Image (spheres, coloured by chain):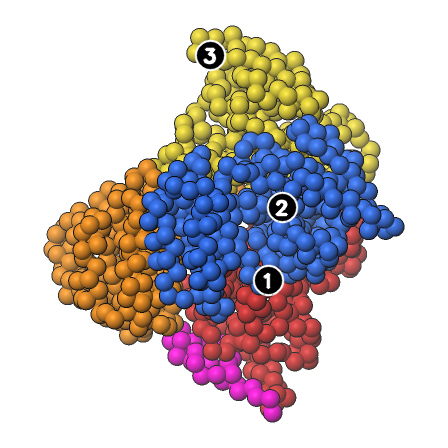
Chain colours: A yellow, B orange, C red, D blue
Amino acid sequence: MERTYTLTISCPDRVGIVAKVSNFLAMYGGWITEANHHSDLQAQRFFMRHEIRADSLPFDLDAFRTAFTPIAREYEMEWDITDSEIKKQVVLMCSKEAHCMVDLLHRWQSGELDCDIPLVISNHEDLRDLVEWHGIRYERVSVTPDNKPEAYARIEQLIDEVNADCVVLARYMQIIPPTLCQKYAHRIINIHHSFLPSFAGAKPYHQAWERGVKLIGATCHYVTEELDAGPIIDQDTVRVNHRHVASDMVRLGRDVEKAVLARGLAWHLQDRVLVYGNKTVVFN
Amino acid sequence: MERTYTLTISCPDRVGIVAKVSNFLAMYGGWITEANHHSDLQAQRFFMRHEIRADSLPFDLDAFRTAFTPIAREYEMEWDITDSEIKKQVVLMCSKEAHCMVDLLHRWQSGELDCDIPLVISNHEDLRDLVEWHGIRYERVSVTPDNKPEAYARIEQLIDEVNADCVVLARYMQIIPPTLCQKYAHRIINIHHSFLPSFAGAKPYHQAWERGVKLIGATCHYVTEELDAGPIIDQDTVRVNHRHVASDMVRLGRDVEKAVLARGLAWHLQDRVLVYGNKTVVFN
Amino acid sequence: MERTYTLTISCPDRVGIVAKVSNFLAMYGGWITEANHHSDLQAQRFFMRHEIRADSLPFDLDAFRTAFTPIAREYEMEWDITDSEIKKQVVLMCSKEAHCMVDLLHRWQSGELDCDIPLVISNHEDLRDLVEWHGIRYERVSVTPDNKPEAYARIEQLIDEVNADCVVLARYMQIIPPTLCQKYAHRIINIHHSFLPSFAGAKPYHQAWERGVKLIGATCHYVTEELDAGPIIDQDTVRVNHRHVASDMVRLGRDVEKAVLARGLAWHLQDRVLVYGNKTVVFN
Amino acid sequence: MERTYTLTISCPDRVGIVAKVSNFLAMYGGWITEANHHSDLQAQRFFMRHEIRADSLPFDLDAFRTAFTPIAREYEMEWDITDSEIKKQVVLMCSKEAHCMVDLLHRWQSGELDCDIPLVISNHEDLRDLVEWHGIRYERVSVTPDNKPEAYARIEQLIDEVNADCVVLARYMQIIPPTLCQKYAHRIINIHHSFLPSFAGAKPYHQAWERGVKLIGATCHYVTEELDAGPIIDQDTVRVNHRHVASDMVRLGRDVEKAVLARGLAWHLQDRVLVYGNKTVVFN
């Protein structure tokens, strides 16, 4: 895999942004391997993502930042640049359900998910063996109705300790407190087991069965303070019929959950997801 | 196409139902071309559909009914038998949007939808030419905030006049009054332009765009008094992304609406849809 | 709908192309509403498409061409610029099967397909009424084993007479002679009723049934001299099972054919399809 | 999970089969929890599958066989009855690729795949740790151009030693010799990494990339002597585009392979797959 820099930009839309940025890159000989733009006409906002071969630029990231900052200021950009050789630090959080964890850990082990996983946090012991077999540290933090403040203080400490760039709730099944949602805004990814906004909250497959829907789904989204209402990264559905009871939906849904979470996380790790308001631009 | 009788049964579940019915059919030499069963374990209810070659039975429908009634009584069956040579009478209702009408009328004209369409009712003139080109009677009944009782009395009269077996709301966009919903229970089919239960009510594509979903959908359901809450016959979804504004969703959604409505109606016409509570068993 | 210019470029890949083109556009105040790039690393070729608001440029197309030509020469570009107000002239060719024609004509009539359709050519009379009801000229040119050269000379004459930009074989079911394939290279679009390369040639649904596949499909492609082997624009599939005989596959396949052809044609009309070798880049 | 017997029947089609079988079951009080029928009109053959609650019958399997044999003879049935409490013995064969193995082993471990896995055979060491972590015996049998007869004799011996009901080639990547294909006819399941019949043989994703297809797929089928030509159990596809090179197709294809193989195997284990000629009836 080539070493690449990834430049992401979100700014008010106006004429000449693309020219300014591509001039800047061309001036230094930047070899662009992928470029994506999006204008949101309603929000009058412009989104942009470039992958550039690192060896084509005479820069390290700091020098890039210095050189690019005047342009970013001129165009009021929110922007970032990342280096494919600096892996993102991802903390996984789980409960007792194994399917998403098995899937993510295998994708990580096989090199498909390009990140480090320094830590898994769970409120149960069930998945310790699985996680430790992959050579990953496993910390159990019990969360009970009585110990929430202490438990989430400990979780926050653990997340900070490993300098996590991103936290993945891989069927964690607990509600994250608002302070954490704010602190790690757009960095906590959840998989909800329904096609949101249908069936938010508890037991979505049972709700789906009660309603008699003919498709069930899953939704990967950033966690916000409002439950199951954050910006959606990806969704998918699978067909069900009258023969499927709620437990069949649970089983079929697991495959959709795995697929949607793995896609959403991969896009996040590749800086393909830009958030604006309560929506995402996904350059995939 | 072979002439067939279709026998549909819904009854409390118990041992021996299949044997009883298949014995009855075998005794008279009935050649079953398709058979479907379903046990709803929770509702303890049994559903069954048989297609039988008409020429294999020594019966017309009346004689069949006479012979079968004792069995039906013994097992407390809700049941029906239909003859493929007696086409169902379908009334289409529409507004200004043409896509579902073009689709249904072509499927009907090409023989794919096996029914008669004696009448189209609309509150506008827009689709008169299209409908009349297909040789079908077109009645405009304006519905305004002031004339609803009279308008729906007229609509009811028209539906009854043609002895409609089924009414299809092909993007009719008006709310059907409760008395009609009850009178034609499980015989009025609507297409809603969202993946219910998400985005019930008005402007679902705009709601979908606001929420930033990554799939949009359509739902074919029987109309009940509660808006967009009736038993679902079929649903489907299509992928959207950040580049799609609400008008793109409208355009992409049209294809899903057409497909889902056409499937749902075809299944209804073939007596493949059995309703129980607020759910459907679809033997497709 | 805004008036836009669409600029498409295909050229050898090297550093600075994007900068050069976006500088050019920015210099003249060009407001880019959509931009897409693609580098084919293996072919070392670069593909680019811009939509620009026409009123943001101080140019008509001729002046644009004059101003851009030096850049195009420097970078050895194959390129084109089109104006959304100059509609493409599309000739449809059909046989007896109506479904693709009904679908395309309705999409055209409702404004979804942005083109003129000055002419339909068919080797049969079956669809004359349908076509003429849409106000479109219908020319029958019988093609028999004995009259092929004369028939296709007549067809070529008709196509040229209306200055067709594009010819669509909407289930035309005849093999186009090599001279026409070459003359209108990358401008004749066919819908093949299988998931190519499976089941090229005649009776693909029967071939699919014989093989016992569990999905059937359709393929929209540019016509080349080699039958069913041209560059693929789009494909899709639908699920079948053991209960579906070949005639059911024909019925289910029609919906896939319609959808895939309509998508492929829409992309072609919007200059979203760039051909290189035997493949397409589709900026959708 | 209820203990059930599963009765599968394939026989020449004639009037009265369903009545005969359901009478037999009703006579003994058999509680049918799922029933499926299929008439292949062309082959004039009838297929049937019943799930019956074991505790509703006054039989063990031997007594059932004795009682049912006269009926089976009369109707020239090929038939079988299985007991949900007698788990099928499944041997997995793999090479170096882990994704299908990780997926199947997790589904097995979590109880989703209802079988025993007494043995995994591989021609490499790569997956030994994974397999043994699941507590399953791992035998490496190297297959080289020089040792094929001895290697497959050893493999046959191993398969027989554990009384395998079924062998799964989970990306085994070697061609099974004809004698084994015959000996375990309809009991060896392969996953092929293309949408057959397209791209049979080696490197299907590279073939797909060369052809420029817009969907790639996977096919689960029974292994026969002719390579990649056996009866298809299930298939699925996933969308690709011009940005995907062959290695991306490999990555995306892995998810389809896993899903299709897991479904096909689950259906096989539940006796839902009946083979006739080179096709399958799948009662799912």
Report the span colored magenta. Answer: C118-146
Foreground: A185 or C99? C99
Alpha-carbon span between mark 1 and mark 2: 18 Å
Q: Is residue C138 magenta?
A: yes
Q: Secondary structure at mark 2?
A: strand
Q: Position of residue A66 (x, y in %)?
A: 74, 26
Task: State the residue position of label 2.
Answer: D166
Q: Residue at x 29, y 50 (%)?
A: B17
Task: State the residue position of label 3.
Answer: A144
Residue B82 position (above or below residue D274): below
Q: Residue at x 34, y 39 (%)?
A: B41
Asked whether, in this view, residue B201 is left or right of residue A161, the answer is left
Foreground: A92 or C266? A92
Badge 2: residue crowd in 10 Å (few <14, some 14–19, many ≥20): many
Alpha-carbon span between mark 3 and mark 1: 57 Å
Q: Residue at x 41, y 66 (%)?
A: D14
Asked whether, in this view, residue D63 is left or right of residue D242, the answer is left
Q: Earlier in the sequence, mark 1 or mark 2?
A: 2
Inspect the image, locate mark 2, and give the three-letter code of the amino acid beneath it: Cys
